[in-house]
Image (cartoon, rainbow, N blue to C red):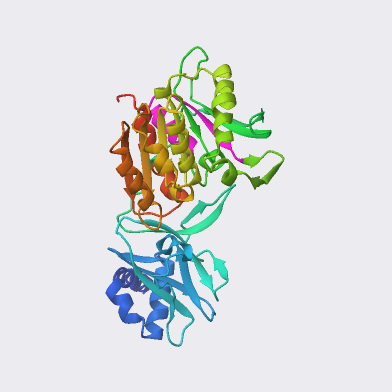
Amino acid sequence: MKNFSALLFFFGILSSLAKAQEINLAFINASLTDSAKAENVYAQLVSQHRIPFTENDSVVFFYKGNAEQVSWMGDFNGWGRDFKLNTSGKKITRTNIWYWKAQFPKNARLDYKIVINSNNWILDPVNNQQQWSGVGGGSPNSEIRMPDYLPDPIFSQSVKQKGSIKKDLLFNSTQLGYQTTYSLYLPFGYQSTGVYPVLYVTDGYEYLHENMGNMQATLDFLIETKKIKPIIVVFADHREPVNRGNNRRMQELAMNEKYLNYFVSELIPEIEKQYAVSKQANQRGILGTSMGGLTAAYFAFSKPEVFGLCAIQSPAFWFKPEIYTLCSNQDNPPVKIMMTTGNINDTKEGTDKMKAILEKNTCTYQLKEVPEGHSWGNWRNLLDDILVYFFSVNP
């Protein structure tokens, strides 16, 4: 009798699993008008960690809780700037379950938050997938990965030969009239008698941060697997050394001539004096995202004899449209450029305009677009493409 009861229990579990596996978009749509079915579907989706629910290019977001109004804000509507997309949720009758349906590219990855009663922005309480974004340390957003999205496998790999980081190195700048800090990546096995390519990175604190750029993981993996040459990377920090809450990036990265002169006449000579870095322009690069992407273009086209490599991620060209005129100078020495952008409320318009300019001058360039927004999840996953393009062992 006990064995028979155990069998019934076992087959009951199998039956429950089979029912759970039957949930698809059509089944969800049919349940939205029936409170009992909706409660059951919601409970199953929560238990299976399937909220937001995705199928092909369709998404159903859910929120359960007492509210007068629920909406979703994220990369998909430019965090509220794109008014064409209505992201207001609908409440299922006789429940406290809210939902919103949308369609995104099947390989998209997007950040979002839930907004309760117009002013309470929260993480999705039943979605453990998160992506950190923001300036000066950032904060988490909830993340949706569509069915065909493939995360970069680099971040799940273990590396034996890790480079070293020298953090928060202080520099007294005469050009700027204040102190700055930077961090430095030295590859595993660094020898002061060698000569290494060098990459300078704006927003360096964020590019190094494990929850944002996590760039050391990418560097270590690519160097250990011999996808790129060992390189030295200098991470510029825009936060005031004695008051980290004061981030000067909007001042320093706005095509600031003083900041360019600080790099060229102070920081680069200091790095070259202390470390075995190449002094050749084609072995020296500048990388940045957003305002830093604007600055990377400004640095490279103002001083192409200094920065022969230029990586531009989701550039804020709109902030200083004169950048297009600067970059259209066909008499400048050639610069090798990599531009990346998301095509969901990111900077596609600006990068397309710059692409047309680059096609007419002496530059060599690549442009990569991904179905993502203005997010560290976007920028981090493209770092390997940039590094291999610039520093490949087999160019």
Q: Residue 132: say if magenta.
A: no
Farthest residue, direction bottom: 94
Farthest residue, direction right: 242
Tell me if 64 is positioned left or right of 329 in this view: right
| Displayed quadrant of residue 47 | bottom left
Residue shown at the point (30%, 43%) measured from the top left: 356
Residue shown at the point (30%, 24%) measured from the top left: 394
Highlighted magenta segment, given as a residue range? 215-238
Residue shown at the point (59%, 25%) measured from the top left: 266
Q: Residue 45, image x and y in percent?
A: 40, 69
* Residue sitting nearer the eye, 128 or 251: 251
Tell me if 337 is positioned left or right of 91 in this view: left
Confirm whether residue 114 shows in the render: yes
| Displayed quadrant of residue 106 | bottom left
Confirm whether residue 152 shows in the render: no
Q: Residue 137, image x and y in percent?
A: 59, 48
Q: Quadrant of the N terminus?
A: bottom left
* Residue sitting nearer the eye, 366 or 110: 366
* Residue sitting nearer the eye, 313 or 251: 251
Q: Residue 224: say if magenta.
A: yes
The answer to whether residue 281 is above or below residue 295 is above
The answer to whether residue 80 is above or below residue 210 is below
Q: Residue 192, image x and y in percent?
A: 52, 15
Q: Residue 281, image x and y in percent?
A: 42, 23
The answer to whether residue 196 is above or below residue 345 is above
Residue shown at the point (57%, 71%) measured from the top left: 119
The answer to whether residue 64 is above or below residue 302 is below
Q: Quadrant of the C terminus?
A: top left
